[in-house]
Amino acid sequence: MIAVRGVYTPWLVSRALDSSFLLYMRGIYVRPLLAAVPVWALAWFLKGSWLPGTTLPQLTLAGCICGAGYSAVAFFVCLPPEHRMMILSRLPVVGARLASRRR
């Protein structure tokens, strides 16, 4: 599954777009991997300090913390600005502020 979804499908897409396979792979994988680096460091810190992950509640809490951390980092690193604005405009308080700035 990794080979098909991670390598073969991007190869087909890059071929259909008449693009370089390596440039396409860099475009789809580098930013998410860079966003994962600080989250990996956070998980490593949590495991070594106060959240070793020896019980199910600890694993659940660590997963929630790391998931929230990755979501926050990926929101700014992986999403294009126009998509970020679309998401932020849906929030009640932030959306009203963004609408007033556009006028």
Image (cartoon, rainbow, N blue to C red):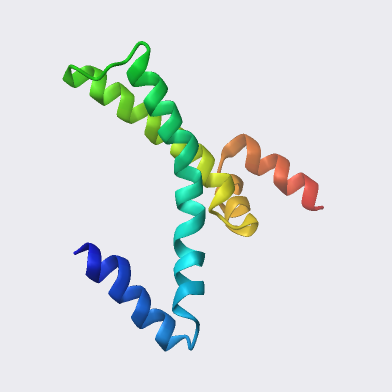
The answer to whether residue 62 is left or right of residue 69 is left
What is the x, y in percent for residue 2? 23, 62
| Snapshot quadrant of residue 41 | top left
Vertical placement of residue 97 versus 84, above or below: above
What is the x, y in percent for residue 66? 39, 31
What is the x, y in percent for residue 95? 64, 43
Spot the residue most to the top: 50
Which residue is at 44% across, 78% downward?
21
The answer to whether residue 12 is left or right of residue 25 is left
Which residue is at 72% across, 48% downward?
99
Q: Is residue 68 visible?
A: no
Q: Is residue 20 visible?
A: yes
Q: Image quadrant for the N terminus?
A: bottom left
Q: How many labels does the image show?
A: 0
| Snapshot quadrant of residue 93 | top right
Vertical placement of residue 75 versus 15, above or below: above
Which residue is at 82% across, 52% downward?
103
Which residue is at 34% across, 82% downward?
12
